[in-house]
Image (cartoon, rainbow, N blue to C red):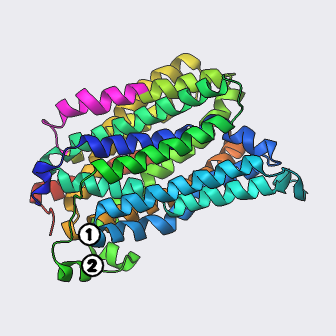
Amino acid sequence: MPSTQKTIPLFPILLVNFIGMLGFSIVLPFLVFLVTDFGGNAFIYGLVGSMYPGFQLIGAPILGRLSDKYGRRKILLVSQAGTLLSWVVFFIAFFVPAEPIWAFESSITGSFSLSWPLIIIFFARGFDGLTGGNIAVANAYLADITPPEKRNVNFGKMGISFSLGFIVGPALAGTLGALGYGNHLSVLAALIISVVALVLIYFYLPESNPKNKKQSAEKIERPTIKFIFGLPHIGFMLSMYFMVFLGFHFFYTAFPVHAVENLKWDVSQTGIFFTLLSTVMVIVQGPILKKVSTKFSEPILIITGGIILGTNFLLYLPSDSTITYFAVILFSLGNGLMWPSIQAFLSKITPDAHQGTVQGFAGSFGSLAGVIGLIGGGFFYASLGTDVFIFSAVIIYLVAFMAIRLLKLETTKTGKK
């Protein structure tokens, strides 16, 4: 293990992750309204939402590989600079006339019109996705500075920083919106937050993966699917990664519609639900995960968490608010145990020289699942109603079943090669 694991503090990378999520989530409460104001509809909103994960499919593996070759800090700077530029472009959309340049109507997509502000937003979200390898590189950074026996707990802390950013972002957007400046102020806040993150990385984040030998850097393979799946057990883990994201995105796409149509919730009640979900997640990924990770291996926690999480999705079928709020506990407990354990196990079986590359492809697989889930979740909900949650449950149950194989890997100690 590199000596950096003992010398680099964890807090800066956690703060970078928190600020990154804060900047992303601050626009979530009003993005759908902004899209419709500029001439779009629900179909266009879905396309705008898929731009980031769609382009991240391309960017994350490349940035991950470059972080193996040139160092994590440099690539995090590039990624954050791309996010900053994307928010600058996004902000410009407010000052461009929203006159329609092309109108379209069909029974499938509904009626919408394209305007220059809408096109600018498409470009901004796509560019942010293309340079959006920050999560993958941050995960590789965390693996660099954390010994294997502590990765489960530290990936849990990374999850906490993510959840806190998701809580604070929408709350901040609501506060800024109450000041009466429309959506301009929230986007400007996202831009400023990106500047803060860039400064933080530049001045306070040391390099975790220095390029000690030029020869070593030159030996890093190009990021191809064939190469990644040629690494022992990595393809299997990425398949699990894909399935987890697919199950989640079916839920995240279908639940807001379910909340309005079946639970009869308003926007405020739905926001409270997701805030409560994130808050309980912080508790699980903090003290609870820290305690159980000393007693149980990652495969055991993946299996247990997967069973609990899968059962949670079935509790949405009755369309009862009381049962739905109880499901929050199971969701948070299951995900809080399962997800950091998957991330930790993936990092443990990945060779040090390819940590960034593998994490980049993991992000790419997650993005692919996100695109499919965003489109499929809405389609299946329209066709099947709440039965779509059975899809999420079955997928997560399959992940728990697949994790049985990891028990053997843990026992035979097939770690890094």
Q: Position of residue 345 (x, y in %)?
A: 24, 53
Q: Residue at x 41, y 35 (%)?
A: 163
Q: Quadrant of the N terminus?
A: bottom left
Q: Is residue 312 magenta?
A: no
The rendered magenta stretch, by its main secondary structure, is classed as helix
> Which segment is the magenta one?
279-297
Q: Earlier in the sequence, mark 2 or mark 1?
A: 2
Q: Residue at x 10, y 49 (%)?
A: 6
Most foreground residue, 8 or 403: 8
Q: Which residue position is annotated with label 1?
A: 354
Q: Is residue 215 above or below residue 385?
A: below
Judge left or right: residue 78 versus residue 11. right
Q: Which residue position is annotated with label 2?
A: 220
Q: Residue at x 20, y 47 (%)?
A: 151
Q: Which structural element holds mark 1?
A: helix
Crowd tier of the residue under label 1, counting other residues whose Cα lies within 10 Å: few below 14, some 14–19, many 20 or above: many
* C-alpha span from label 2 to label 1: 7 Å
Tag 2 near tag 1, CB within 8 Å: yes
Q: Which amino acid type is marked by label 1?
A: His
Q: Which structural element holds mark 2?
A: loop
Res. 21 mark:
none
Q: Judge whether residue 394 can be spotted in this image.
A: no
Q: Is residue 176 above or below residue 343?
A: above
Q: Judge whether residue 10 can be spotted in this image.
A: yes
Judge left or right: residue 319 versus residue 13. right
- Write down the quadrant of residue 219 in the picture: bottom left
Q: Position of residue 118 (x, y in %)?
A: 75, 53
Q: Position of residue 291 (x, y in %)?
A: 17, 30
- Write down the quadrant of residue 74 in the picture: bottom left
Q: Which amino acid type is marked by label 2?
A: Ile
Q: Is residue 288 magenta?
A: yes
